[in-house]
Image: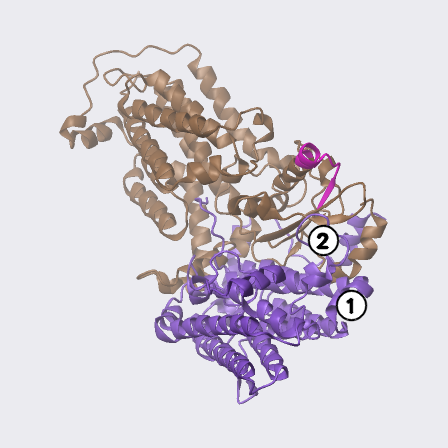
Amino acid sequence: MVDSAPLISLRRLFGALVIFSTLRFLFYGWYDCQILSPIITFPFEEFSFLYRPNHLGTSLLFGGMLLGGFSIMTGRFFKIGTALFFLCFTYVELLDKTNYLNHYYFVSIISFLFLFSRAHKENSSVSAIQIDLFKCMIGLVYFYAGLAKLNSDWLLEAQPLALWLPAHTSLPIIGGLFKFKATAYAFSWAGAFFDISAPFFLLSDKFRKWFYPVVVGFHVMTWLLFPIGVFPWVMICCATIFFSAEEHRRFWALFPGLKLPEITQTGEKIILFKLFAICFMLIQMLFPFRYLMYSGNLFWHEAGYRFSWRVMLIEKPSWATFFIKDSTGKEEEVNLSNWLTVAQEKMVSSQPDMIVQFAGILRDKYKSIQDRDIKVRAEVWTSLNGRRSQLLIDPFRDLSKIENTWAERDYVLPIDSVISPTEFARIKKQLIQQSDW
Amino acid sequence: MSNKNRLLILNNAGRVFRPVFILPILAVIFHGCGSGSSDNSSSFDRSSLLSNYCDNIIIPGYEDFYNKSIQLHESVVLYSEGTSTLQDCREQLYNSYLSWQRVMPFAFGPAYNNLLNVSVNTYPTDASQIEQDILNGIWNPPTSDFDHFGLPAIDYLLNFKDQHDSDELVRLQQLTSHLVDLSSEVYNNWNDAYGADFKSSTGTELGSSISQLLNSFNQVYEQNVRKQKLGLPVGISGAIDIGNSLPDKVEAFYANTYSIDLLYEALLSFQDLYNGDYYLNEQKIEGLGLDDYLISLGEEEYGSELDDDIQNQVEVSLAAISTLSSPLSEYVVSNRDEAISVYIELQALVVLWKVDMMGSLGVLVTYADNDGD
């Protein structure tokens, strides 16, 4: 049994942050533009049974998040509050792939782990593995984010930072550096090194003290340069778990009302917790490697891309045109703004599984609204990390017949199958006649 | 052979993606070699680019459109007084239409605030509503229904009829005077504060000048050139139940003779805009443009190679437009397939500008209301 101080710190900071994050979400009105007003949504296939909430349901979900966040922060009604937060937050996250963010996934995981911990008994010791589980999880996020950067785009081409950094030449002091490609290389390599080494430096009693300011500096820098919301602050708070219990006690002693109570009780062993921790971490370690099941360029087909700590790796401007055809044989173009929000259009245009999902939604809507059986195809031009645009998917494949599964995405064209828009335009008619379309 | 394979064999030159796990040293060498060469800093002078656009293209463009609007209005006034001919009015309308193509791409800032683009050129125009307006005789500037105002409404009044009664002449003058008011407002805005603001915002973040300009450039080309001027008339894109030509959707439908001229002029306007070129005393002068921006990225696939492709495709598209024969409203019916192949060339330019060029410049244009990660 060990001093629970690091765990209690994490609980308090995390609770405060999720309250802040929820209020920020409400303040920007995102519950309206992400949940209520879209005409259609793109749920994760495995969770498509979840009801899309109406106005009341949305209010309840966000009320639940706030209440749960409060419960996490204070430790009162901890188990039920954490469960409430985890369920409400994850529910909202699963409603639409468009809004998927790695840090939402991270928040879900941390609140899930709190469910099994004794982070609410401030005067009680806990078994060491309770704290170590959080250290493992947070360390894994850094390490895997670093591994994901070890690819030729990031290291050899400094992409996508070479595209993004020149946008910040007006930043004071360091802004002038961003016009040099060497800066993009330096940032790419430093970023990869930072992510991979962060867990080890944070674990080391010798290096932690001077490495933590680097953590803060790194995350503040990303906050300045990229629109990534509260993610930097979440990581800055979570990385404190690596500090010793004494250091945590000294920190809270600075605030008289928040001082941690002395340990007076010996914690109880949670039955099977060790087994749970090992299983959970094994899944976390293996799941991001599912991309190895698929051939081709991961950033291009994006099969196995999500839920794997791949952050800030791709710039993928894309332009998709969807075509439908019914039994009369006449082809029509789909007006995307009739169906999709701006954010959805951006995601649907560049992510193959969402292209297929949209085709399926169109098929069902045309059937139920107009009683027409339609086929759907899409011409999708995509540029990945500064490459020239290419067709992302087979432009003559009837997408309405495809179901999203975990199988290889054979409707995605290989990234090295370059055909220029002009070449395509010239041979399109001939290709269409030869296809089943 | 399947279509997929056909696409594969066409070319095989894409940059291949290699996962690297143990090759950092190799990469250091790569990097070390690279940083010596001169094309490795994207030190493109965005400030000069914006100045060129503002001072040599946008403001002179609006000045010209303003002058053409005045000339159109004056010709209509003289015609109403009986001191000028209908033919003169029609010629002035043609000039106004041509001049409009040069400022149409700048649908942000003053143009956006004054509803300029929708007020000047929403078509097809609603003829029965125009007749209703004439009966009403009251002037209400448009706020939502724009399809009985601007150039298309004037086109209807001047070109559909050869005789005009006094009510019609009043309406004509209201419409032309509305153009004068709008164009003078936008021109003055640019000349006063907005032009200076435009030139001073040299970043590439969301809402910066270059972001607004490129966003508008792509939007207007895609929607108002490719789709409206040719796509809709040939019946390619847009609303449900298309598959036949829609000849009454052509631009300047009642004049009927110069829809193709306007399409050609619009593409020339985008070509000059892309190249940063402008005219002094009818002499073409090469200025700093998006072409130079791309070339500054080096001799890479997304640098000068991309510029070459864009230049070629613009030339190909201009040549394709030249194969259309006037009037467009008849051509899209009689030669629908040929018209569609011209449309396909215009379509290819959307890809090059909207995907490739935007993917190269790293300028944020998406107004998605969310965090990224």
Query: Which amino acid, mark 1?
Result: Tyr
State the SS at label 2: loop
Residue at the left extreme of this rendering: A256
Task: For chain A, give the colour.
Answer: brown
For the point 29% across and 44% down, the residue is A213
Q: How many marks?
A: 2
Residues behind callouts 1 and 2 on a single chain: no
Q: Nearer the viewer, residue A436 or A33?
A: A33
Mark 1–mark 2 distance (CA, rounded to whole Å): 36 Å
Residue B62's disc number: none
Q: Is residue B236 magenta?
A: no
- Tell which subunit mark 2 falls on: A
Q: Which residue is mark 1?
A: B331
Q: Which residues are magenta?
A: A364-377
| Residue B372 is at least partly visible in this image | yes
- Tell which subunit mark 1 falls on: B
Q: Residue A332, position in %: x, y?
A: 72, 49
Q: Residue B141, position in %: x, y?
A: 46, 63
Q: Residue A203, position in %: x, y?
A: 35, 33
Q: Which residue is mark 2?
A: A417
Closer to viewer: mark 1 or mark 2:
1
Q: Residue B190, position in %: x, y?
A: 40, 73
For the point 74% across and 72% down, the residue is B327
Query: Which amino acid, mark 2?
Result: Ser
Q: Is residue B193 above or below residue B287?
A: above
Q: Is residue B24 above or below residue A176?
A: above
